[in-house]
Amino acid sequence: MADVKRRDFLGMTLGGVAGIGAIAALVAMKKTWDPLPSVVSAGFTTVDVNGMQEGEIRDTQWRGKPVYIMKKKSGDSISPDRDFKLGDSHYSIGIKICTHLGCIPNWKTNEELFHCPCHGGQFTGDGVNVAGTPPPRPFDIPPFIIKGDTTLVLGESGIEYEAMVKASSKA
């Protein structure tokens, strides 16, 4: 074995400690870039639409935003850019935030319209803004995917959502 001098040994030791420190710093930086598990889980909301009656609206939240899901009545018009089919029924979905000033509209059952309490904005059950009222565009649609026969997962983009986006871009 070669004769190692004290100065060489200290240099190798210092280099080894610096290398370990650099690796530890890189691992720590990587962990700060990764989202927290609570943030990742907050990105998805699972909704079971089993048992919904025709015309019923179910409210939920996705990423802190109010979302409605409405089971369409038989005989209601179906809009490919706003409605999707699940089983034998059609549903409408939207983020229930007024596109005018960000208020949360209330559903008026007798009129079958969403009414914004602040400035009189109105939306149909499909989430389309009524002409002549302040909102400039329809409700936004959250990304969703259908799992099984009765479950929606909000926050993940599925085939039905992609079809709705494609249909609305053509309109």
Image: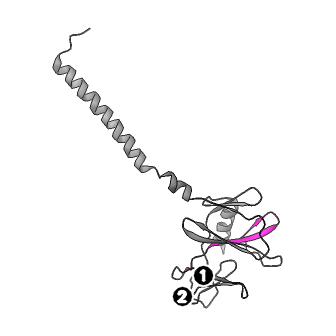
Q: What is the basis of the colouring in this image?
A: one colour
Percent across and percent down for residue 69 are 69, 71
Relative depth, front residue between 120 and 132: 120
Q: Does residue 113 lie above or below 85 as drawn?
A: below
The answer to which quarter of the image holds residue 28 is top left
At 56% from the left and 55% from the top, the residue drawn is: 41
Judging by the rendered image, the residue that carries numbered circle 1 is 105
The structure residue drawn at horizontal position 59% and vertical position 59%, both measured from the top left corner, is 44
Q: Is residue 19 left or right of residue 109?
A: left
Q: Quadrant of the N terminus?
A: top left
Rendering quarter of residue 7: top left
Residue beneath disc 2: 118
The span picked out in magenta is 75-98
Residue found at the far top of this picture = 1
Which class describes the residues within 10 Å of circle 2: few (<14), some (14-19), or many (20+)? Answer: few
Q: In the displayed structure, does residue 69 sit left or right of residue 100? A: right
Which three-letter amino acid code belongs to the residue tagged 1? Pro
Tell me the residue at 34%/41% (across/down): 25
Image: 23 above or below 76: above
